[in-house]
Image (cartoon, coloured by chain):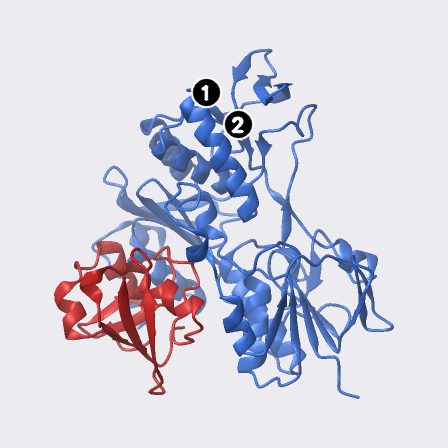
């Protein structure tokens, strides 16, 4: 009897990467890639940007054509929901009642947007943005709002919300962004950059409300009609986009008794507490050297963990410990972030903030933690090298454009 | 529409019929040409779709933006005068018959 092979639950960035890395790593038995959406793997980053703006067709969003996966011996099965993992029998129970055995299992189940915990939060036209279907539903409703000159409301001034706001403005929609905190992207960006993004959006005509407390959603027969604030005022609207974070999809793993803590706990190589099961991407919480858990939601994390998880199933150690990086496109500004700024207590700005091309360096004491670059790709790529090498400029050096930071790497 | 030929580092050559508006990165990744990664989905954010364009393409393509030039400074393989990021090149009839050569590594 031949071994059942490797099954991958989740056909997003991490799942596809794991499948291809298994083949590239010489794995010769069967690989089955299970996706719960009706279509095959696609790129998520454009959903809040070019796709939402209607500048891209479905074929261009495709990450890998299904026949290309087939050519690599990767069997893609779409519209499949996994109900349970039976670890003793090494078998998955699928929603259609069938069972699927595995030799090795990759969990790449992603994350789910948090729903608005308010009355009316489930009204028609109150939408998250995670999947292609979500983005299409937002685009459809946005078009109606533009036609009827109804404002749209974005709840949450995070990356998803702000990217949607920028795209909506580009399409000519009236946009209000509600952020509960005193500044935008407060957990990630330095205050000076939060303020810069607030100005950028206001300059593009977004009505930005900080310290905003949403009290409820009002709806009529057409769905959402207004957002009620804590002070009793109501913002009339025809579309509410909710971007208040995501929760890791770790239910399958938890039900199977794998260690989970707001995500499937993995080591740097993507291993879970079961030697036959690895995990990758948004669904994971990675145990770091100091014992703390790190949750990242990014393309880089998905691809790197996908490769590590594949290697782990092939019996190899491929730890992912590189500095994290992220990006966000809003209007004609590209923000590229390297490192993690948590714990920063000092900042230096390099470049010209007014001119819109600059970087903010985050320090804890003398140690460089992270660098956020706006339209400054060179600074960003250099920052990744500095962080990877553990080399810190002083804040004074970082802020001095005449000082060659690259020289510190030589 | 344009027929673009991708020559991978191992010499394997594949010609793809690209619809107008498609980037050379999209053409490669959806058709399983492994020499191009395109990790960021075409946002000019990752520099993993580095390619070398032939003289014809070099002659007809608009010059790279500052953002693309900055990313090209950090490609992993050798940067040459004809280095471009495939995600920033959009297919049009002017590109018909173009050939891009892919580097040995992208990351």
Residue A408 picture location, percent across and down: 32, 67
Disc 2 crowd, CA 10 A, few/some/many (<14, 14-19, 20+): many
**Chain under disc 2:** A
- What residue is shown at x 61% (from left), y 16% (from top)? A230
Specify the chain shown as blue: A
Do callouts 2 and 1 mark residues in contact (Cβ within 8 Å)? yes
- What residue is shown at x 41% (from left), y 24% (from top)? A147
Specify the chain shown as red: B
Q: Are marks 2 and 1 on the same chain?
A: yes
Drawn side of residue A285 relative to residue A334, left or right: right
Residue A124 picture location, percent across and down: 62, 28
**Helix, strand, or loop for circle 1?**
loop
Drawn side of residue A11 relative to residue B46, left or right: right
Residue matched to label 1: A150
Residue extending farthest to the top is: A232
Looking at the image, residue A339 lies above or below residue B33: above
- What residue is shown at x 69% (from left), y 30% (from top)? A117
Drawn side of residue B107 relative to residue B53, left or right: right
Q: Is residue A393 visible?
A: no
Q: Is residue A133 visible?
A: yes
Residue extending farthest to the right is: A88
Q: Between residues A197 and A116, which one lies in front from this camera angle?
A: A116
Answer with the quarter of the image where residue A261 lies.
bottom right
């Amino acid at each position: 009897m031949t071994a059942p092979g490797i099954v991958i639950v989740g056909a997003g960035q991490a799942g596809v990467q794991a499948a291809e890395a298994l083949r590239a790593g010489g794995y010769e038995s069967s690989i089955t890639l299970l996706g719960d959406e009706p279509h095959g793997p696609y790129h998520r980053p454009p959903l809040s940007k070019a796709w939402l703006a209607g500048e891209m067709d479905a074929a261009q969003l495709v990450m890998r054509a299904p026949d290309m996966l087939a050519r690599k011996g990767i069997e893609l099965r779409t519209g499949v929901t996994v109900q349970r993992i039976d670890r003793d029998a090494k078998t998955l129970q699928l929603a259609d009642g069938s069972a699927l055995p595995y030799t090795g299992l990759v969990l790449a189940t992603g994350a789910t947007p948090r729903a608005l915990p308010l009355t009316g939060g489930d009204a028609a036209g109150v939408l998250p943005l995670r999947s292609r279907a979500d983005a299409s539903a937002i685009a459809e409703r946005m078009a109606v709002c533009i036609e009827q000159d109804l404002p749209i409301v974005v709840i949450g001034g995070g990356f998803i919300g702000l990217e949607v706001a920028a795209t909506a403005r580009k399409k000519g929609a009236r946009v209000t962004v509600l952020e509960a905190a005193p500044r935008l992207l407060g957990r990630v960006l330095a205050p000076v950059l939060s303020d810069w993004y607030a100005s950028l959006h206001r300059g593009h005509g977004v009505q930005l409300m900080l310290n905003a407390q949403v009290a409820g959603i009002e709806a009529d027969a057409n769905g959402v009609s207004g957002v009620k604030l804590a002070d009793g005022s109501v913002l009339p609207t025809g579309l509410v986009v909710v971007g208040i974070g995501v929760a890791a999809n770790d239910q399958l793993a938890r039900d199977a008794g794998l260690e989970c803590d707001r995500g499937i706990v993995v080591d740097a190589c993507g291993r879970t507490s079961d030697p036959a099961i690895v995990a990758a991407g948004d669904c994971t919480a990675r145990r770091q050297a100091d014992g703390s858990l790190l949750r990242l939601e990014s393309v880089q994390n998905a691809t790197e963990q996908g490769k590590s998880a594949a290697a782990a199933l092939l019996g190899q150690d491929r730890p992912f410990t590189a500095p994290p990086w992220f990006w966000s496109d809003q209007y004609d500004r590209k923000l590229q972030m390297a490192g993690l700024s948590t714990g920063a207590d000092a900042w230096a700005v390099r470049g010209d903030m007014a001119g819109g091309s600059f970087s903010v360096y985050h320090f804890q004491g003398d140690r460089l933690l992270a660098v956020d670059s706006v339209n400054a790709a060179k600074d960003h790529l250099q920052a990744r090298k500095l962080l990877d090498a553990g080399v810190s400029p002083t804040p004074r050096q970082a802020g001095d454009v005449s000082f060659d930071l690259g020289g510190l790497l030589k | 529409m344009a027929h673009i030929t991708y020559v991978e580092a191992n010499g394997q050559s594949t010609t793809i019929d690209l619809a107008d508006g498609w980037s050379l990165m999209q053409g490669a990744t959806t058709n399983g040409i492994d020499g191009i990664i395109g990790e960021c989905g075409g946002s000019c954010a990752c520099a993993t779709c580095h390619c070398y364009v032939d003289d014809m393409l070099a002659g007809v393509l608009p010059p790279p933006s500052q953002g693309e030039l900055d990313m090209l400074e950090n490609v992993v393989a050798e940067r040459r005068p004809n280095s471009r990021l495939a995600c920033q090149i959009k297919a049009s009839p002017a590109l018909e018959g173009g050939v891009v050569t892919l580097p040995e590594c992208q990351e």
